[in-house]
Amino acid sequence: MAMNPEPQVFVFLSELLGRKIVDSEGRPVGKILDVTGNLAEMYPPVTEVLVHLAEGGRNVLIPWKRLAETRGAWVADPLKPAEFREPVPRSGELFLKETLLDKQVVDTDGAKIRRVNDLQFLHAHRILHLVHVDVGFHGLLRRVGLERPIGFVFRTLFDYVMSDQLIAWKFVQPVSSPDLLRLNVAQNRLAQLHPADLADIIEELDIHQRSAVFQSLDVETAAETLEETDPKIQVRLIEDLDTANASDIIEEMSLSEAADLIGDLPKERAEGILKEMEKDVAEDVKELLTHPEEKAGGLMTTSFLSFAPERTAEEAMETIRREAEDMDLIYYLYIVDEKEHLLGVLSLRELLVAPPQAHLSELMDTRIVSVKIEEKKDRIADDFAKYGIMAMPVVDDENRLEGVILFKNLLEVVAPKLGR
């Protein structure tokens, strides 16, 4: 005859805290103050229980596996004093109440900052696994013992039944300390967020948490996130890094964004970072820094693709495959002569459908929309809105190509003009 499987029961941390533990004879052992677990695991199992002993009044840790729930009471197997441990978690483990309750976490599924009001565990086969965090008002009421009276009022007066707002633990990233962030590097939860969402989250945190989150990111993710972050916060984040790490991250940013950030840093700090950067990248950044931010020269990047008119479509594609990773812009190809005079422009889409042996001079569009290097933001924004292009070449007075302005670098100026 097949035996019925052990039922699986959900238990909230608030339902454990303060609960009495008794021995097999019903004598009091103590009460539960907290539990420990390793937050780096997908669904952390509870390993030990912090107990305030009834006899002696001291706090100790006892193994969770020595507890069992019997008829609504938590019963401890016979314990010897030698099995009591000092209240210090083992390596890699943390007190879950102390670490998570009332703390801010990132909901990586919803890309939001949340406040933890309770923890939900799955109790199966005598193992307690952390499976959800409760971020709702219902969880807060449960903790303070007002769940039933307030719930009754809501049902009676408003015909409203409160529900739990639970987030699966696999989508939760604690942010209260650098150590917690490093625990989950293997799962890389934060790096799975879009950089714009991650920037919003960083901006919501306090100054210490911002640095902790930012410093937990890999270099590429940090650079992408920094580009989406408010300039004032960019400066603070970079100032919290050592020069070597700061230079590594700034090198991964687009040239125009990197130049803007370097220009906002204190002079001595900026010079130190530029010295650490790769020489060619640092020189490009320095060149951009010579142009005022409000004009075309200060908005452009010099990381784009340009080709001689006699090059073929096949040759251009080979160059793109080889160099695209290091370019800020690959959607447009600019055709220039030997003196860098701008002759025409070609989109990547047009290149992809072109005959491999066709010369770029046959494919390029000579109706070029460009701006002069001294042009101001508003005029450039008008042209972006009028022509609906993704990037705009910047030329000098002799029509030599100096750089390219990306649409996103002018988005805050362009957006109000798009509805005209």
Image (cartoon, rainbow, N blue to C red):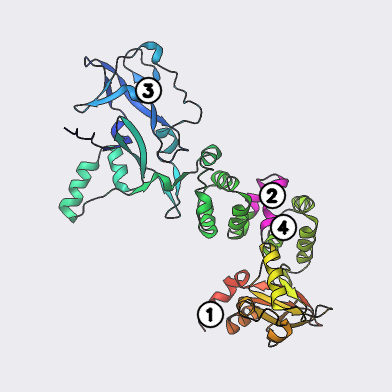
Q: Kindly state the secondary structure of the residue where label 1 is placed.
A: loop
Judging by the rendered image, the residue that carries numbered circle 3 is 63
Q: Kindly state the secondary structure of the residue where label 3 is placed.
A: strand
| Residue type highlighted by circle 1 | Leu
Residue at the far right in the pictured view: 339
Q: CA distance from mark 1 to mark 4?
A: 31 Å
Judging by the rendered image, the residue that carries numbered circle 2 is 246
Q: Quadrant of residue 405?
A: bottom right
Q: CA distance from mark 2 to mark 3?
A: 44 Å
Sequence-wise first label, 3 or 4: 3
Disc ID at residue 262: 4
Judging by the rendered image, the residue that carries numbered circle 1 is 418
Disc ID at residue 106: none
How far from the left and from the top, in percent, is residue 221?
59, 53
Q: Kindly state the secondary structure of the residue where label 4 is placed.
A: helix
Q: Which residues are magenta?
A: 235-253
Sequence-wise first label, 1 or 3: 3
* Foreground tag (1 vs 3): 3
How far from the left and from the top, in percent, is residue 251?
70, 56
Q: Kindly state the secondary structure of the residue where label 2 is placed.
A: helix
